[in-house]
């Protein structure tokens, strides 16, 4: 059972005892690309990079990385649209190193101008890498289609113009506005005593600043008919995302949608996998998922197909949506999906890093935490009628969106087939 508390500074603590030979310290900050203005697009991600460039105690990247490398620790950072995270996973006996490491880079980073200029090239190459990977990039284009020129529709990494324009003052100002105690969640998962966790937290994070945090721009959603974003690119395979606007993280209908997604495309026995891959042989991978942000959400199906068979694959996918609307879903499929969700949740939470992520994500996004059993009760309560209502509400032409990356120069052929109602 986890416990929540706060330091005098307002820093949020989550203690998650777990019998394990390893412990994970995860520090997450409630800031991401949605909090940025156009001129500093990509700054959250850029700043994440800069924390690893040097402190007084460890003056360069080599000294920073060696500190955990020499005890076999795992560590990294990540930036999303609504949060930024830093973690260190170590053997139990080295847990204090994790606190020393993460607190040092977060509270004492130098953020030197010469490091900023050098890192610009690294980030631009990271951009190029993503753009050369259509399987990953098509999902980014899907969100661009949904949210257009809002912060939610921009790439987390920003663009080359904004990245090249950034200066030291941008980083310092952004850090002061967002890296504040009340905006930070610190979670430790592992076989550590609670007193030791609190003492280490107070010792290493006593320097964190307090203050009033800034809110992000709320997403505005407008759509009345199917929409397409086509990126004409020479590729050996066409990748597409076909999906619908849906629910935010606070909406209880998300549980029914999760079951629906599981049935449609989250397993090798799902309807889309069996129909589009196994029966029709149109793809190697096809999958569905649900994304829930604090102020928006969507259901999505993604696949990679032969360039000449893209229309057939989209039609086959849409036909599975129609079957759900026309025929419904059996109780057998619903029960199987519920048990699958439960099983995946339990398996995932066996490791300290997954447990820390499970708890911290909830705290950051919803400012509340439910146990896996409490969450599964919400899944278990979903009825056949709930799923039917959600399918009818979500699977509609006014919510339908399609992003494509591949050698296709004309949207018209896709517009003709992009409809749920015949």
Image (cartoon, rainbow, N blue to C red):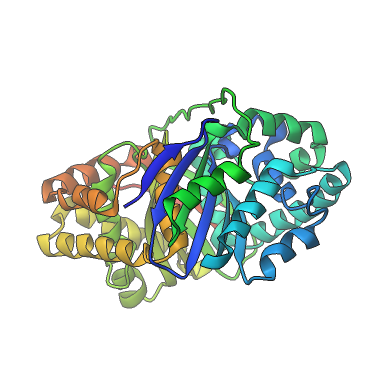
Residue found 74% across the figure and 52% down from its top: 123
Q: Is residue 248 left or right of residue 71?
A: left
Q: Is residue 181 left or right of residue 192?
A: right
Residue nearest the viewer, comparing 17 with 365: 17
On the image, the x and y values in percent for residue 382 come to 16, 48
- Above-or-below relation of 200 to 19: above
Residue nearest the viewer, comparing 193 with 159: 193
Residue nearest the viewer, comparing 49 with 155: 49
Among the 4 quarters of the image, the one containing residue 333: bottom left
Marker count (numbered): 0
On the image, the x and y values in percent for residue 318 come to 32, 55
Q: State the residue lying farthest toward the right.
A: 114
Question: Do we see residue 383 in this rendering?
Answer: yes
Among the 4 quarters of the image, the one containing residue 269: bottom left
- Above-or-below relation of 173 to 324: above
On the image, the x and y values in percent for residue 301 come to 39, 57
Among the 4 quarters of the image, the one containing residue 297: top left
Q: Is residue 94 left or right of residue 53?
A: left
Q: State the residue lying farthest toward the top.
A: 212
Residue found 45% across the figure and 53% down from its top: 357
Residue found 29% across the figure and 60% down from its top: 262
Q: Is residue 201 left or right of residue 399?
A: right
Question: Do we see residue 187 in this rendering?
Answer: no
- Above-or-below relation of 24 to 245: below
Residue found 61% across the figure and 41% down from its top: 205
């Amino acid at each position: 059972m986890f416990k929540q508390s706060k330091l005098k500074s307002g820093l949020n603590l989550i203690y998650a005892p777990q019998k394990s030979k390893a412990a994970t310290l995860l520090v997450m900050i409630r800031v991401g690309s949605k909090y940025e203005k156009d001129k500093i697009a990509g700054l959250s991600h850029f700043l994440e990079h800069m924390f690893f460039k040097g402190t007084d105690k460890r003056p360069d990247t080599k000294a920073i990385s060696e500190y955990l490398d020499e005890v076999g620790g795992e560590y990294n950072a990540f930036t999303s649209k609504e949060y930024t995270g830093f973690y260190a996973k170590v053997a139990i006996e080295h847990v204090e190193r994790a606190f020393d490491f993460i607190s040092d880079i977060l509270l004492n980073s130098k953020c030197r101008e010469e490091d900023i200029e050098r890192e610009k090239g690294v980030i631009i190459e990271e951009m190029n890498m993503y753009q050369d990977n259509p399987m990953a990039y098509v999902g980014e284009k899907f969100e661009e289609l949904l949210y257009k020129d809002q912060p939610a529709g921009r790439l987390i990494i920003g663009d080359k113009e904004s990245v090249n324009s950034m200066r030291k003052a941008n980083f310092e100002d952004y850090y002061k506005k967002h890296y504040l105690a009340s905006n930070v969640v610190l979670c430790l998962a592992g076989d550590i005593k609670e007193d030791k966790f609190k003492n280490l937290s107070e010792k290493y994070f006593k320097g964190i600043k307090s203050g009033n945090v800034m809110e992000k721009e709320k997403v505005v959603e407008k759509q009345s008919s199917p929409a397409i974003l086509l990126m004409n690119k020479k590729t050996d395979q066409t990748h597409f995302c076909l999906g619908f606007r849906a629910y935010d993280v606070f909406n209880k209908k998300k549980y029914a949608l999760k079951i629906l997604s599981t049935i449609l495309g989250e397993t090798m026995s799902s309807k889309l996998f069996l129909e589009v891959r196994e029966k029709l042989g149109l793809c190697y991978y096809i999958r569905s998922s649900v994304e829930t942000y604090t102020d928006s959400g969507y259901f999505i199906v993604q696949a990679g197909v032969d360039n000449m068979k893209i229309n057939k694959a989209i039609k086959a996918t849409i036909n599975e949506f129609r079957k759900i609307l026309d025929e419904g879903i059996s109780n057998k499929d619903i029960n199987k999906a519920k048990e699958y969700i439960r099983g995946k949740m339990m398996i995932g939470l066996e490791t300290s890093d997954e447990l820390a992520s499970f708890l911290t994500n909830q705290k950051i996004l919803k400012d509340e935490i439910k146990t896996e059993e409490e969450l599964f009760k919400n899944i278990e309560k979903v009825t056949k009628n709930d799923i039917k209502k959600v399918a009818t509400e979500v699977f509609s032409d006014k919510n339908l969106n399609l992003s494509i990356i591949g050698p296709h120069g004309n949207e018209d052929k896709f517009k003709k087939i992009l409809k749920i109602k015949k």
